[in-house]
Amino acid sequence: MKNRWFSGLVLLLSVYLAQAQTDTNSRKIKIFPVPAIGHSPETSTYFGAVALASFRSAADTNTRESNTKVEFNYSLRNQLILECGWNYFSPGEKWFSEAIFRFSQFPDYYYGLGRNSDARDEVQYNSNRFRTSVNALYQLRSNFFAGPLFRYTSYSRVQYLGGDSITYLELSPSQVWGLGLEARKDLRNSLLGPTEGYLAGLAVSYNQGAGAGYLKIEPDFRYYLPLGEVTWASRFYAEWNWGDTPPFYDIGLLGGDRTARGIYLGRFRDVNLSTLQTEFRIPLFWRLGVSFFGGLSDVYASGLEVKLSPLIYNAGGGIRFLIDRESNVNLRFDYGVASGGQSGFYVAFGESF
């Protein structure tokens, strides 16, 4: 744990110095190029470089800030990760686009399906992964956007590294293409550090691959309530798949930095997923703040299997370091615990949701 916190402190200092250097430049484009040193349960400690840029496509303040990120990481588990993406508002917010492109060479763990999957059934496998998701949404009414989305995922060179390779026949290489529509009402005052407003989104796509055709439905609701200087943030997210059974990597994966902190990403997975997360974000003094979060989640084969008990829980807290006062962008250090004695430490730009 000492190494994890030391890595985080090095990153914090690097970001602060980089931010101090860009403060004297034009405020229209802000770039934070820093070494990436951090930790997550999926990667262990990782090293690399990241460049985060935030900017406005128009001079007026009615157009919210856009952002883009390019990142390269290599972990102590011999994992290679290349990622880039953007969240872009056109002038006057006539258009909005969100995209992610990610390649990874990734030794990983698989535990089977369902909330009752046993950690003792763990197998380790390696694979080359490429994932992309892009949308282009047009503002039809005030802050209401809708438009097409495209998604593609490929797993190749799947190779067992440990465990019983006969146990999980679904661990095989394949690729999936998806086309669909997305609609969202977005009244957040910021994308990376919202303190008020809400997001109500729904994405529906038809996906084909690995001998399967299925409909994927993803509701995403986020609400931010200001309580003085404190922000109470909540999110409900679900992934429902209808039709043929999707490949093991395109079903509901619970865990990770964005969905349920404290749970290893993919430790629990099934055809469907639902999660409710809530968090209190509290500024303290200077650029420092803290947060406390928790949530309840479930993975299940069909809607008839949703149960109120036992749900999968996660909870934790973290430290915030404000790297950009104007845009309210934090560098965050989070530690979470979860069902089954799991835990995870995370270092990242921007809030989890």
Image: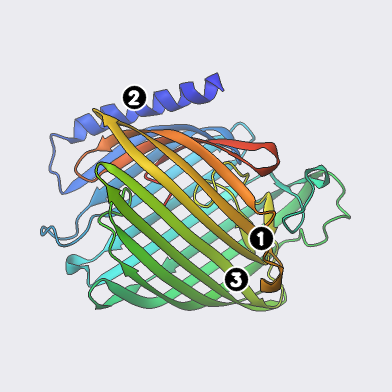
Q: Position of residue 257 (x, y in %)?
A: 51, 46
Going from N to C along the chain, the mark reached first, 2 or 1, is 2
Question: Which residue is drawn at the image coordinates 71% and 68% (left, top)?
Answer: 305
- Give the quarter of the figure containing the N terminus: top right
Please tell me whether mark 2 sits on a helix, a strand or a loop.
helix
Q: Which residue does the numbered mark 1 point to in the structure image?
A: 299
Q: Which residue does the numbered mark 3 point to in the structure image?
A: 240
Residue 250 lies in quadrant: bottom right
Mark 3 and mark 2: span between their CA atoms? Answer: 41 Å
Please tell me whether mark 3 sits on a helix, a strand or a loop.
strand
Please tell me whether mark 1 sits on a helix, a strand or a loop.
strand
**CB-based contact (under 8 Å), mark 3 and mark 2:** no
Q: Amino acid at mark 3?
A: Trp
Mark 2 and mark 1: span between their CA atoms? Answer: 39 Å
Q: Is residue 35 above or below residue 6?
A: below
Which circle, 3 or 2, is nearer the viewer? 3
Going from N to C along the chain, the mark reached first, 3 or 2, is 2
Q: Is residue 108 above or below residue 309?
A: above
Mark 1, Cα crowd under 10 Å, few <14 / some 14-19 / many 20+, is many
Question: Which residue is drawn at the image coordinates 54% and 44% (left, top)?
Answer: 261
Q: Amino acid at mark 1?
A: Val
Any part of residue 140 in sight: yes
Q: Which residue does the numbered mark 2 point to in the structure image?
A: 13
Mark 3, Cα crowd under 10 Å, few <14 / some 14-19 / many 20+, is many
Going from N to C along the chain, the mark reached first, 3 or 1, is 3
Q: Position of residue 87 (x, y in %)?
A: 33, 59
